[in-house]
Amino acid sequence: MCGIVGAVAQRDVADILLTGLQRLEYRGYDSAGLAVQASQGQVQRLRRLGKVEALAEALAQTPIQGGTGIAHTRWATHGQPSEANAHPHQSGPIMVVHNGIIENHSELRQQLQQQGFEFQSQTDTEVIAHLIASFRQQGHALLQAVMATRKQLTGAYGMVVMDEQSPEQLVVARSGSPLVIGAGIGEHFIASDQLALLPVTQRFAFLEEGDVALIERRSYQVFDSQDQVVERPLVESTVEHDAGDKGQFRHYMLKEIYEQPQAIANTLEGRLENGQLNLEALGDLSQVEQVQIIACGTSYHAAMTARYWIESLAGVPCNVEIASEFRYRRSVVRPSSLLVTISQSGETADTLAALRLAKDIGYQQTLAICNVPGSSLVRESDMALMTRAGAEIGVASTKAFTTQLVALMLLTVALGRGRQLSTEQEKDIAAALAHLPALIEKSLAMNSDIEALAQRFAEKHHALFLGRGSQYPIAMEGALKLKEISYIHAEAYAAGELKHGPLALIDAEMPIVVVAPNNELVEKLKSNIEEVRARGGELFIFADEAAGLNTEGNVMVLPVVHCDNRIAPIVYTIPLQLLSYHVAVIKGTDVDQPRNLAKSVTVE
Ligand code: M6R
């Protein structure tokens, strides 16, 4: 999604803006631009289609000096990717960058055209620039013009406005798309997330829904949706390390895959001590009679896995739904239900909207499982269980997923206590979790074998992924990873479902990836594998050696470390992540920023 950076400083800010944009590249975008204003001077704007690198080259040729500026990476929604549609958008002295969608842009465009405003782009954003300009023409100060403008907008926005006639000021507004203010010494910054600003500050204030803020060099002032002054205090950043660095790795995705043992250990810290699970932070869940989980994408796959755990281990009914479906259907709220949302970013528009709807329709207890402290989802939920994966930059989610699974296993135990989960079972789960970082390390040792195997996928156009029970969502996640970064069409099936249709797809050209731990379903899975073998499919099986799989024929079995079956979904995720990564590298795709995708989908 679009990325925003802004600065009001005494020094030149063009490089700060550019660095900020580079650090937001992971969000996904198709064009980039900036505008800088010299004190008392004219605003200069530069925009380029394509990567931030192209903008940096243009800036190197035409350096722009000045201490107030705004910058943007655009992920096209209204209007194709082009220089004319790139932000900042201008209306006379007004420059605007915007993240979100203005739903009533057509009618506003018509009104503004009737007033004589000429449009230079196809974007919804340009109406904001002209609206602010029209209020300025009526004599409003910049802050009041933005406040008046937002009352006319329907939709979502995080926006930053610069005005040639109000140098050394930025006005920002948030409704649906997050913005953080960063405080330096005698300078202030604004960005869509903290990562953009970590090179210049560690102190942040988080804007809330409906806020408007006036940002100046030495101060910032925030107003709520009623235009009343409110406090949004500065807090020290909790981002532990500067994740904007790939270190020894070629891609963020690979770095993040390798960070999983540590990320999992961090997620368990303080929650697993001396073999005991400390789950007090989750409060009293003894009255919960049903769990409803809502999420999107990879987070939805974590939810699907948790459903198997929560019902089989805790004995609590659990329902899982994709957020974009939940939010547009009339669902029944069962009494004493716990509403759980799962999100890496905590800013996914569909998940947030689903949470808000759930509260409106009567869910009394809400829990967010999330990786970003201070995110909207965390702030709007009654409870939060943080995943502590650290910043995830690669668009393809990896360490966020496995840490979500760890958090969900903790939730399962918390729900199971006092119900059907015995003390003995809880001890076994605690022991398995304690061992998990080491098991992930061992799984990472499969890297070179998987790299070799990836060659066999590079020329393929389709792939199937199979699993059963709690490994079915892992197969789904494996297929999603392959699709999103290698652009190979991949589908996952619960292996027992093959004979109901997908078996027709099997031939010698179709690679079939199977996840096969040695669990209670392995004999059933073996029969499904035989169905594929009999039809000449090319099988790649990630298996526990103890499962005793038949290796005859067109079959490659890759041994996976033996582990407790309850945590096997987490362990079997690793080889699938590595497989999709290496296939993408061989295919030469943009691994960290796959085409058409955004890291955090903050629009509908
Ligand atoms: O930030 P969230 O977990 O809410 O994001 C949900 C999905 O957009 C996300 O998991 C997406 O599917 C990933 N790109 C998958 O790798």
Image (tube, rainbow, N blue to C red):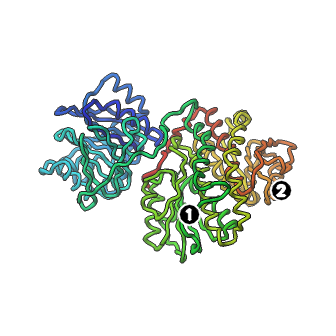
Q: Residue at x 65, y 65 (%)?
A: 310
Contact flag, marks 2 and 1 (Cβ < 8 Å): no
Mark 1 residue CB less than 8 A from any atom of ligand 1: no
> Which circle marks residue 77 in the picture?
none
Instruction: Residue type at mark 1: give it.
Output: Glu
**468 to 242, vertically: above or below:** below
- Residue at the disc numbered 2: 527
Residue 588: quadrant of the picture: top right
Count of labels in the image: 2
183 or 122, which is in the foreground?
A: 183
For label 1, the crowd category at 10 Å Cα-Cα, with few meaning under 14, some 14 to 19 and many 20 or more, is few
123 or 190, which is in the foreground?
A: 190
Q: Position of residue 423 (x, y in %)?
A: 71, 66
55 on left or right of 130 = right
Q: Residue at x 60, y 60 (%)?
A: 278
- Residue at the disc numbered 1: 280
For label 2, the crowd category at 10 Å Cα-Cα, with few meaning under 14, some 14 to 19 and many 20 or more, is few
Q: Position of residue 535 (x, y in %)?
A: 81, 49
331 on left or right of 515 = left
Q: Secondary structure at mark 2?
A: helix
Residue 463: quadrant of the picture: top right
